[in-house]
Image (tube, helix red, strand yellow):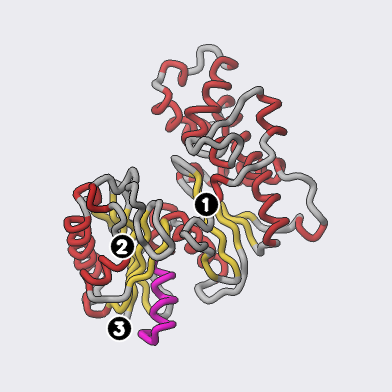
Amino acid sequence: MTVVAGVDLGGTAVNYTLVNAQEKFLIDDLCEHPSLAKQGPEVCLRQIADGLQIASKNAGVQLSDIVALGLDTPGPASAAGLLSARGSTNFVHANWASFDIRDGLAQKLGKPVSYLNDANAAALWGHYAIFGADSRETSISIIIGTGNGGGIILDGNVVKGKNGFGGELGHVLIPYQSIADTLGIKPVCNCGRIGDLESLCSLTAIENNLLPYFLPRYPGHELGNVPPHQAAKLVRGLADKGDPLSKEIFRVQAHALGLFFDEMINTFDPDALIVGGGALEASKEFQQWFMREIRVGMPDQREEQTGLPIHVIPNGDTAGARGAAIEALKLARRSGLM
């Protein structure tokens, strides 16, 4: 048996999956270990290798059966896996600066490794779940988490861009005035931009821009007695239960996403729109309501565009590792390894 592995390296956990030549995933649930990324490259890469041995055993295959790996990490990093010289939140150890993490893991394991940033990997999994690994369709994905990431799959391939910033959709400016001017807020993103998608559609947006607006309009609300960072994390659960304030916050996020998707439709004319991330780790009823609100937020579409489907990424917790594995599967097939 020959298989490929997907490794999702985050700041707190490393998640693994394995897939065979028939595109069957051999690990159904989370197979993860605490991340040691903050201890630097040497410790982290050794831990990835040790965890891969455990994942192989759990899947009932030998480590030697793995012919290629797909790795994904948070950015900033180049399209080839060269980490930023300035470091990042998840790679604070000094030795990570300008470290080639893809090549480092390839040398550590003696196997070819492909690389994606984590949002692109999740987008690739969402695309694959709908169209299959060898599709030629185009999709636009948004991953709503602490920030807002995304991915563009064009003719079946991830758009990485010259410097690896392809799919940085959260920082695309949207015509936010139709939302923010009505509310009387100035949506500032952590990157400094005003009115990009992340400034209205992310956990950070809830904490910095949306809760400060809505809480004074709901006197005595339970979130008013909770520290802002913690309160922001509680909004999704409360919205899922029907709390009016929390649902209004998610309505704003959905309408912002509608404006953004309208831009993408008129740029790429995609086959599907896809939404994922922690914001949608909720009930089916809430997900369906959120999707309807996205359509409400879209400007009038051409008749041919009104039936464009909007999907929710399945297997949200393992989406990154699964997308990384699909990228590795493509690498293995191109290289004649499968």
Q: Secondary structure at mark 2?
A: loop
101 or 63, nearer to the observer:
101
Going 53% across and 70% down the picture, which residue do you hit?
157
In magenta stretch: residue 78: no
Q: Is residue 196 above or below residue 161?
A: above
State which tag comes first along the sequence, 3 or 2: 3
Task: Residue type at mark 2: give it.
Answer: Asp
Looking at the image, residue 220 sits to the left or right of residue 65; the answer is right
Give the Cα distance between marks 3 and 2: 30 Å
173 or 229, nearer to the observer:
173
Going 52% across and 24% down the picture, which residue do you hit?
211
214 or 77, nearer to the observer:
77
Q: Secondary structure at mark 1?
A: loop
- Pointer 1 local density, CA inside 10 Å: few below 14, some 14–19, many at least 20: some
Tell me, for residue 78, which label it has, or none.
none
Report the predominant secondary structure element of the magenta stretch: helix
Give the Cα distance between marks 2 and 1: 21 Å
Tell me, for residue 1, which label it has, or none.
3
Residue 107 lies, in percent from the top left, at 23, 71
Question: In which quarter of the view is residue 118 placed?
Answer: bottom left
Quadrant of the image for the C terminus?
Answer: bottom left
Q: Secondary structure at mark 3?
A: loop
* Number of the front mark, 3 or 2: 2
- Pointer 3 local density, CA inside 10 Å: few below 14, some 14–19, many at least 20: few
Looking at the image, residue 213 sits to the left or right of residue 84; the answer is right
Give the Cα distance between marks 1 and 3: 37 Å
The residue pinned by badge 1 equals: 168
Task: Residue type at mark 1: give it.
Answer: Glu
Tell me, for residue 100, which label it has, or none.
2
